[in-house]
Amino acid sequence: MASFYTDKMAYIHVPKTGGTWLMQALEAVGIMYKVVAEGAASHVHWNGMPPRPFRFGFVRYPPTWYLSYWSYVRHTEHPVSDNPLDTAVLECDDFPTFVDAACSRLGGFLSAMYDVYLGPPGEIEFVGRYENLRDDLITALQLSGECAGWKAEDFDPIRELAPVNVSSKSTNTITPDLEARIVANEKRAMERFYGASALTQAD
């Protein structure tokens, strides 16, 4: 997956937040874009993108992000990384053990990663949520001016596009205890992107 840009906007791709689907969604409505780079170089941060008046990216609810990342590393062929989270995945035989290792050894890993990719609060113009991917992408396109003059039905291909890259190999689930552990570990990301109320709801 890669970050990309058009004349009016720049998209910062955060791993495991729907980037493959998003690129297909833009193609489905005829929006052409330029990819920043391929491979490892595609992981461009908020302050490394070509200057554009509108920059956006997506985050994902930390418990489901961790499960998706676990499944990706365990079941998908990809270049070996020295990322400490990859190391934790490969060292652990099951998802609960991985969560314990990640929380105890890499406290707040995802919160820090969101900061690196998306910058401090207020630095980029829009951050959407993976859980609201279709509507938040449409909002980003409208705010960027990329789709000026479009009618509501012009967005139908985005609303109708099925999910992609959804792993079916993992048999792990997020138990309430695991969810609470991850939410507490990623308190900073939860407060910034999901609101303080989401912390109490996961308790």
Image (tube, rainbow, N blue to C red):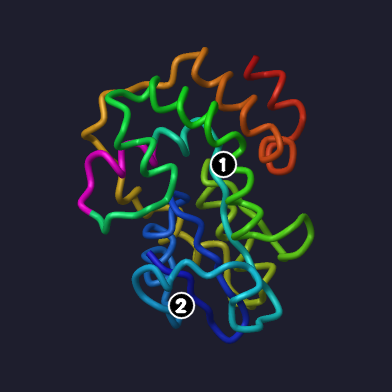
Q: Secondary structure at mark 1?
A: helix
Label at residue 109: 1
Residue situated in front as seen by the camera: 27 or 100: 100
Query: What residue sits 44% from the left and 59% below the top?
Result: 158
| Horizontal and vertical percent position of residue 47 | 66, 73
- Name the side, left or right, on which 36 lies relative to 86: right
User: Is 135 situated above or below 90?
Assistant: below
In reply to whether residue 71 is colored magenta, the answer given is yes
Query: What residue sits 57% from the left and 62% below the top?
Result: 152
Q: Residues within 10 Å of mark 2 (few under 14, many from 20)?
A: few
The span shown in magenta is 68-77
| Horizontal and vertical percent position of residue 177 | 52, 13
Residue situated in front as seen by the camera: 193 or 41: 41
Q: Quadrant of residue 79?
A: bottom left
In reply to whether residue 116 is colored magenta, the answer given is no
Query: What residue sits 75% from the left and 57% below the top?
Result: 120
Tag 1: residue type? Phe
